[in-house]
Structures are given as C-alpha cells and as structure tokens.
Image (cartoon, grey):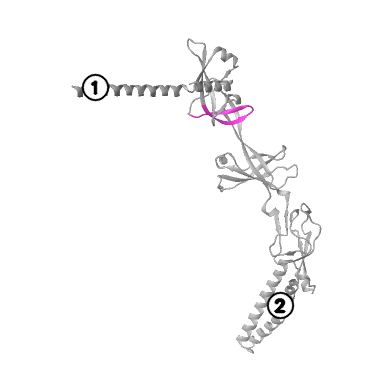
Amino acid sequence: MKTYLYIILLCFLASCGAETTTDTATEQTNTVAESNFVNMTDAQFKNAGIQVISPVEKIVSNTLKINGMIEVPPQNLVSISIPIGGFVKVQPEILQGTYVKQGQMLSVIENPDFIQFQQDYLDTQSKLEYTAADYKRQTEMREENVNSIKVLQQVTSDYKSLQTRLKSLEQYLKTIGISVAEVKKGNITSNITVSSPINGYVTVVNVNAGKHISPAEVMFEIVNTDHLHADLNVFEKDLPKIKVGQKVRFQLNNDNEEFEGSIYLINHKINEDRTVNVHVHFDDKGKTVLPKTFLKAYIETANQAVTALPDDAFIFSEGKDYIFSYLGKVQNKDEQTFEMIEVKKGASENGFTEVIPVENREIKDLKIVSKGAFTLMAKMKNIGEEE
C-alpha cells in the first residue's frame, strides 16, 4: 500500500509541474505577442499630437548613389622614356603643370654610343652597295656557266644578310630618335631630342641638366584632359537597374556644383568587392576637373508607383525600421491601441518613402501614425523596462 501511495504522490507532483510549465510558456507567449502593442490614454493621445493617415500611392524614382573617380583614357596618359641611357645635355624650363604641344622638345640626351650606331649604319650601307654589285655580277656569270653554284650561293647569302642588318640598324636609329635621312647625308650626332608625343599637361618631371637617364626610366608623364571620363563602382545587386545611355548626375567631393553625363560602357567582369566598373562620359565638364578626383554620382532609375508614407512615419531602432498602425479605441476604456510593425524602406522622394512589409503583410489598408511615432516608441520602451 505504501508503494502505491508513493507512486500516486509522484504522479500528482509531476502533473502540477507540467501545469506550471504550461502556464509559464503561455504567459511568455502572450508577453511576446503583446510586446508589439502599446496603449495610450485619450489625454496622452491628445497631448502627444499624434496624427494618423492612410498610405498613399506615389510615383517615385529610385536614385542610386555611387562613388567614383575621374579618369583619363589610357591613350591620353603618356609616360616618356628612352630605350638607351644618356646624360641630360639640355633641359628647358618645364615644370609640373606646364602645357606642352605634340612634337615640342622636352629634353636633349647625349651619349657617345649614338655615334657608333650611326657609323655602323653607314658601314653596312657601303658594304651592301658593294655586295649588291657583286651579287648582280655573279648571277650573270652563273647564267653563262662561268662560275660555280657555290660561289653564287655565298654571295647571295652575304647580300641578304647585309640587307637585314641595314634594315635593323635603320629601325634602331628611328627608335632612339635619330634621323636616318640626316645620317645618310653624313650628319652624325651624339644627341637625341626627346619630344612630347601628345598635347597635354606635364604631371611628372624626373630630369635635370647633367643627370644620367637609365633605359626605360620615366622622364616625364603627360596627361591630355580633353577626354576625361568617370569610372563608377556599381554594386552587383544594382546592376539590373542601369543601362548604356542612362543619364548620370555628378558632384565632386570638394564642390557642390553638379554636371551631367551618360553611361557609355558597362564592364562584364565583377570585381572582388562585388562591384562592376561603369564608364561614363561627361556631357560638358563646364570647368577644369583633374584626374583622380573623387566624385559622387546619382543615377535615376525608372519611375514606378509604390505604397509610400511620410518620412516622419518611420522609426529606426536597433538596426531595423518600424511604423505604428492605429488600431482604434479600447472597448470600455479611455485608451487608444497601436501596433508596431517592422518594415523596410524603399525609394525616397519629396518627403515620402516607399514602405515594404517584412512579413508580406498588407500595409495599404491600415491607418498609420504619421506624427508622434517617436512618442509611441518611447512609451513602449518605458513599458518594457517596467515589466
């Protein structure tokens, strides 16, 4: 009998514990469910100046804000160097920022080795003239079977070899900037002139009189600013919103003046930071802008009708956006009830912002608090702290 009594007692205690646990869980569920609601007395409602409106349909244009930089095409940025070293003999007064024209002298380089190259060219030319005459004579003799095939083959080989060497020396002289026509006249020089290949502004000067210039060392950099463009970094998620020909507004980081352009090219490669390079041409710079200047660009996407609310209707709290829905008066009480609803913001224009429900909840048929939402949020937080 004692054993049976113990078993009955244990079952009774277990049943009571289960009921307590169930009641606690129900209580917690009700607390969570009620945590999005807040009540106000009629007096508080009046003093807070709360206003309630219905969502409206607005035509808004979604504007993408994008960072970018002013650049120049590769063909408009030139680094100048020489293929063979030498000493700077003449250096005119050229400073950073100097505007130069195509063909203008930038510097004169001197190297005694230049004389040897020209001498080799003239020697080769003389040997070629002699070998050409011998080749012609041996060919005629072979036709008459006077000489052997071996002799003709040797002369032919020498003739072609000298032809190749002369062309190579001629091309080399052109590369280092020596006039072949002047060398043929016997005008040998130890100097070469470094000239500007384009019109533009000098941005780098690495030379001075008497300095030794090594092969491939950059002497000058020149930039032509006639065809500046903007390179924008558009995020991957925004790529479907843009297209070639779309209008773009620009604003330099150091200036409030705006100017316009249009999308010219869209790169087909996504960068490591999940952005895509977009190449934009200016309609009219309107002023002198410099390469490598940072800018902000604004691209307006297609207009569309959306459900919108005044900007004051939104509350940002703990990393999320919320609005308050007005549910009406509490039955038999002098109180008003409001529900806090999590939403997301869409496009904004003229004081209105698109409202996007988080849980597929219909918003357009609700009454939304347009003024006083901060007061409701503060009261809700105070209630939470008291609980």
Element class at badge 2: helix
Q: Range of the magenta residues? A: 342-358
Q: Residues within 10 Å of mark 1 (few under 14, many from 20)?
A: few
Q: Nearer the viewer, residue 127 or 367?
A: 367
| Place of residue 341 in the rendered image (x, y in percent of width and height, measured from the top left) | 51, 25
Work out whether residue 226 can be spotted: yes
| Place of residue 269 in the rendered image (x, y in percent of width and height, measured from the top left) | 56, 48
Left or right placement of residue 331 versus residue 145 in this view: left
Point out which mark residue 124 bears.
2
| In the image, residue 245 above or below residue 357 | below
Number of numbered discs on residues: 2
Residue 56 highlighted magenta (yes or no): no
Q: Nearer the viewer, residue 9 or 192?
A: 9
Residue 355 highlighted magenta (yes or no): yes
The amino acid type, in three-letter code, at marker 2 is Thr
The residue lying at 70 percent from left, 53 percent from top is 76
| In the image, residue 170 above or below residue 56 | below
> In the figure, residue 194 lies in which quadrant?
bottom right
Work out whether residue 307 can be spotted: no
| In the image, residue 26 above or below residue 143 | above
| Place of residue 55 in the rendered image (x, y in percent of width and height, measured from the top left) | 56, 23
Left or right placement of residue 308 versus residue 112 in this view: left
Task: Point out the frontmost of discs 1 and 2.
Answer: 1
> In the figure, residue 133 lies in which quadrant?
bottom right
Who comes first in sequence, dot 1 or dot 2?
1
Residue under numbered circle 1: 8
The amino acid type, in three-letter code, at marker 1 is Ile
